[in-house]
Image (spheres, rainbow, N blue to C red):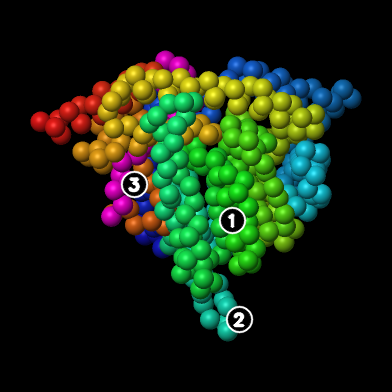
Amino acid sequence: MKFSKFGQKFTQPTGISQLMDDLGDALKSDQPVNMLGGGNPAKIDAVNELFLETYKALGVDNDTGEANSSAIISMANYSNPQGDAGFIDALVGFFNRHYDWNLTAENIALTNGSQNAFFYLFNLFGGAFTDEKNESVDKSILLPLTPEYIGYSDVHVEGQHFAAVLPHIDEVTHDGEEGFFKYRVDFEALENLPALKEGRIGAICCSRPTNPTGNVLTDDEMAHLAEIAKRYDIPLIIDNAYGMPFPNIIYSDVNLNWDNNTILCFSLSKIGLPGMRTGIIVADAKVIEAVSAMNAVVNLAPTRFGAAIATPLVENDRIKQLSDNEIKPFYQKQAKLAVTLLKEALGDYPLMIHKPEGAIFFWLWFKDLPITTLELYERLKEKGTLIVPSEYFFPGVDVSDYQHAHECIRMSIAADEQTLTDGIRVIGEVVRELYDDAKK
């Protein structure tokens, strides 16, 4: 059976497909697996209890005796292509209440997860354009700081349309300890990027906190990116999957801003509902109209059940309270544990940890590692421990001559304490052996 070019592109092996396949295999395996590679959020008792309570209430919130509860309504009816109207209204109220953005329902659309949202947005703003001379111009999505999210790489319908800027790498301390580093945007390189100057950038995009590194771009960096985007009349897309206001896995004292040139993307996945596949886009009405039209073609309408669960939690602010009081402290505790375990496992070996500023991952840099981390990934998998090698996180970068892109791994800290302990122990054993053998 022969596939079209579209089919060939989306059936070829990719970093994200490998990650999801490994996650599925681990869940099906009857052997113990230290799952430190996937993006599943942690199972937090208080979070699960609230969702279960809300889920049950949806089935009995109509006392008229008719089979017309919120659960039935959400499952038995399509929404419009923009998404569940009740949830959108609740989000408008929430964001205006907490941020005073003066949004209306025309500024919000729902998607089947944020991955679906980025498929839409990156194809709206990246790819073939027609200029004022009616000539074709190929435009890219500019990633101002790489490494970036593995799932961005392969969402374009044709080819890959990314331009990326390598980071400044600063050695920093964390809680008074050495052995940490932080990525910062190289604005000089960004401002001098030929594609930007020549009008071949369709949008700027960053995640905050960054998946995979846990880096949080500062308010000054965000303001500078917003200024550049406005100067070149392109949107700034901000991926808030791990950020403010939910799940708020962000430890820096930063602000969240929005204007008509900014596109904010949110998700219910990392508050603990990844199976609901509910993404949220806040943008100018013209962008929302485009996303709604794409929803109609691709999905008819976005799923409603995640919206049904989240609506009451957004209306009464419990989603924010849950994020601030349960989710954020849980991951802060996990981060401290992971630092302790890594320091114990690798001691004086050449390990650098990206400063943990948020998200649910650690980004580990093994300087001058004798093998690539793609090979390290395979060795760890043989020992029942899954991580993600770094080379998949550099869309728009030629990693063949960038050594740093082959020396890092992404490690989830969302696992339970025993899995995290066992997984880091295995990482330590394998990495120590690699460095020791190289000295012989």
Which of the labelled discs sits on residue 225, or is there none? Answer: 1
User: Which residue occupies 71% across, 29% down?
Assistant: 319
Q: Earlier in the sequence, mark 1 or mark 2?
A: 2
Picture coordinates of residue 429 (x, y %)? Answer: 26, 23
| Mark toward the viewer: 3 or 2 | 3
User: Which residue occupies 46% across, 26% down?
Assistant: 176
Q: Alpha-carbon distance for marks 3 and 2?
A: 39 Å
Q: Disc 3 designates what residue? A: 405
Secondary-structure class at tag 3: helix
Q: Earlier in the sequence, mark 1 or mark 3?
A: 1
- The quarter holding residue 36 reads top left
Is residue 215 depicted above or below 232 in this figure? Answer: above
Is residue 119 depicted above or below 246 in this figure? Answer: below
Q: Amino acid at mark 2?
A: Glu
The quarter of the rendered structure image containing the C terminus is top left
- The quarter holding residue 291 reads bottom right
Judge by depth and name the residue closer to the eye, 405 or 121. Answer: 405
Judge by depth and name the residue closer to the eye, 30 or 230. Answer: 230
Q: Amino acid at mark 3?
A: Ala
Magenta-colored span:
401-420
Secondary-structure class at tag 1: helix
Q: Amino acid at mark 1?
A: Leu
Q: Disc 2 designates what residue? A: 132
